[in-house]
Image (cartoon, grey):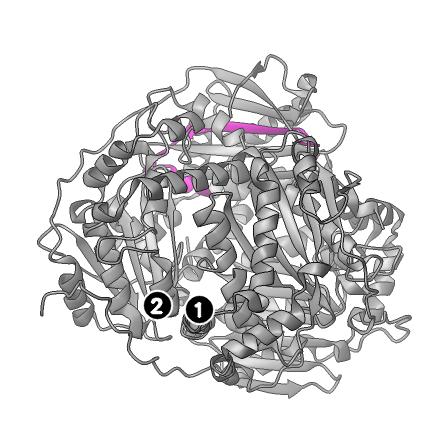
Amino acid sequence: MLNVTLTPLDLPFTKRPLANGLDVIVHEDHHVPIVAVNIWYHVGSKNERPGMTGFAHLFEHLMFEGSEHHNSGYFPPLQQAGALLNGSTNTDRTNYWEVVPTSALDLALWMESDRMGYLLPALTRARFETQRDVVLNERRQNYENRPYGLAFMAITSSLFPADHPYHWMTIGDVDDLRAMQFEDVQAFFRTYYHPSNASLTIAGDIETGRAFDLAERYFGELAPGVTPARVGATAALSMETRLVLEDRVEMPRLYVAWHSPAMYAPGDAEMDLIGELLTSGKMSRLYRSLVYEKRLALDVSAFQSSRELGSFFILAITATPGRSLTDLAALVDGELQLLADGGPTSAEMERVTAQAEAHFLYRLQSVGGFGGKSDQLNAYNVFRGDPGFFAADIERYRNADAPAIRAAARDTLRGDQRVLLSVVPRGQHALALPGSEPVAVS
Amino acid sequence: MTAVDRSRLPEVGPDPGFRLPDVARHTLANGLAVRTIEHTSVPVITIVVQVDGGTGADPADREGLAAITADMVDEGTGTLSALDVSDALARIGGEYDVDVGPDATVFMLTTLTRFAARGTSLLGDLVIRPSLRDADFDRVRHLRLDRLRQLKDLPPAVAERAFLRMLYGTHPYGHLALGNDRALRAMRVEETARFHAATFQPHRATVIAGGALSHRELFGVVDGAFGAWTGAKDNGHIPTAAAAIEPTARPPRLAVVAREGAAQSELRIGHLSARRNTPDYSALLVMNAVLGGQFVSRINLKLREEKGYTYGARTGFDWHRGLAPFSMQSSVHTAATADAIRDSLNEIDAIRGRRPVTEHELVLAKASLTRGYPRNFETAQQVVRGVAQLALYDLPDTYFEEFVPSTNAVTTDDVTRVATQYLDPGRVTTLVVGDHAAIDESLRGLGLGEPQLLPPDPGQMT
């Protein structure tokens, strides 16, 4: 029961594929003289294989090193034109974006099309090796040298079997990165980086007709490529798994993870709202009970990590000094059981639906960047084949009523099919949940 | 359509015209300064309450007082408990945020336009009349003590704390907002009440409201929420502005916080350098962009792209009202620690004249700062934050208009002059949070003196 009638929630667009298969989507917004160029390649670490991980992400780095007709860094010409730019990789997709003054739209499209069509002639062994070092540093900084930084690795490798595409981290295994062959990197580009596996959104201060003309002009000449076969895989847990990881941390933290409905599947929006109900704000069930009232936990968070092949729902709770993870686990279980038995109250539903509505609106504020309108249109197009899924997306949240949420909690948050990971200070294995097996990650 | 010419990059056209936000100024009868901005793209409104006094207003033995007081603001007001406040904010889809800076504390609420009056009124109640109950205080204080403990495991936070202390000593800018363990343990809720009474006064605050309403409507909403604010009568001791206190000069140092077995070394290199109101602000921005302020800067290209030492390295000025640091920050592979320091110092030195900024670098830096300027005005939140900065640093209403011309007026000579004047490799303090045993010997070879080993919790040192 979202109150959408009072606020215009709309994301209009025009979509037209080029002859080579590139999807082009245009959205006009003339408030500020800027245009967002946003490209998604439907490739992520799920397209890798065991022993050859880290390609998709390393590739994102190589895309900034130069292409045949601009054989030097990708940043200087665009920054000189006043652009903001970046890219990111996850399990399912890789995205690249520029936000440019309207006057530099041609430049951005030239640059993006050149690296889509003509990257390999400029990709040298030296560039590959330098960027591999940069990635190894990124890995040290963001995972190895960060408290709890290896927890996700431990969780996904336990949730998913060794041959499942979500088993490994997008950043890749150190050994795989070191063993990576230049020829394999080139082959990866040929397979996944071409118009038939990409989606281009141009959003902002531009007329629709002119945007399509420009897209045709810069991208129309590129060879189509072969649409790669979709990856399919399923995973399920048959029991509860208890793991312990020793880390350089002061406070023990418990992670609980479950398989959950895939992105946009029935139950996905419900799980998203369950994350809010449990841990968003002081009134949320777990925060209120464990942080606010009992003061047993320092922080608690839970969220649905929506993925293409199957999602996971992760809850993390950090104990205050001297408190036991075992006690916390029992209290968390009690709250989860209450939600599965009784469902949310009407007051809770009013709160989370108001927040959901607001978030849809807030997401309409920016044309570019991660999560901006151009990024959303590409997400809907790549994962749903329909950039117009915005309205249906809101509908999913509108339909997520109390009974649906209760059902999702009951189906997903099962005590007998989950991974429990205790992250404890080094040398203090005893602080983990009883029966936890040490897990080795690096 | 003609075929694309790939022999050269397309020309970039002239910068598109752009209407900067029109900022209206008002003053309420109680002395509260109000600024409003009409921003109509999406039915959203952002309100900022900026109060004079941030971490720099913490009493010497009560580091963290400003931040915990700000944290207490949404813990209840009038008949509303902390839970009620949280519920009320959620019901208007509100995003509430507090930022305790060195000179000011900023409360920000973003909500849907249709909740403008309700949201602003709630924000007013919170800021003007927080309950400051002892039970809430005790809980909040313990959460902050525990967070302080957690920060000991986070290399960037450890580095930040130690580095500020090394640069400033006991000066009020010399600590993080969170404060330290000893001070937090000693603090009492009455002290937050006194701090609130002294600093949360209408004549010490500015409210900025921007969103899809007219100036008149925005003003009405703010007036309704803040018009009756009188401030405490007996407002006690108003802290001396940190900006007015001159930091004492401290000798250059090289120091290490040991983190056994660390995969990377967290680096900070810098010294106190400039104030936000310096007439050389534009030249310093351009100089920093060339040196380490953007991806294609000298230091990032050297350490990341050429040497592969790091995922990224950057330099920057911490702009305060008072004297604040210029510093280089990076996290580098342990084995590359000494080399990364050497290369960074070399770049800091070179831009002062040995390898002055080139015309090409200058053009690139200025263009990257100016041509993308309009994108800073896309959302109500961006605009309101921008206007809050003008208020904080007493910048003129014409600041936004002047930004592009004054940046474009910077010359290569200006850059070399400010680099010489504001950067001094002979004066830098260098801090490493890393594997002491692995790096100690190589650090000795840097010629920066004997590396000093700091205690593991450098927040406590003086």
* Mark 1 lies on residue: B361
Q: Residue at x 40, y 66 (%)?
A: A7
In this rendering, position of residue B329 left or right of residue B69: left
Foreground of the two, B133 or A143:
A143
Magenta stretch, residue numbers = A249-272
Foreground of the two, A21 or A121:
A121
Foreground of the two, A374 or A426:
A426
Q: Are marks 1 and 2 on the same chain?
A: no
In this rendering, position of residue B11 left or right of residue B137: left
Instruction: Report which quarter residue A207 is drawn in.
Output: bottom left
Quarter occupied by the N terminus of chain B:
bottom left
User: Label 1 marks which chain's residue?
Assistant: B
Q: Measure how far apart labels 1 and 2 are at the Cα level.
A: 20 Å
Q: Residue at x 53, y 28 (%)?
A: A256
In the rendered image, the vertical position of residue A402 relative to residue A222, given as above or below: above
Instruction: Report which quarter residue B363 is drawn in.
Output: bottom left
In this rendering, position of residue A202 left or right of residue B197: left
| Residue B243 percent across, percent down from the top left | 77, 71
Give the SS element for disc 1: helix
Three-letter amino acid code of the residue under disc 1: Glu
In the rendered image, the vertical position of residue B217 relative to residue A308, given as above or below: below
In the rendered image, the vertical position of residue B314 relative to residue B222, given as above or below: above
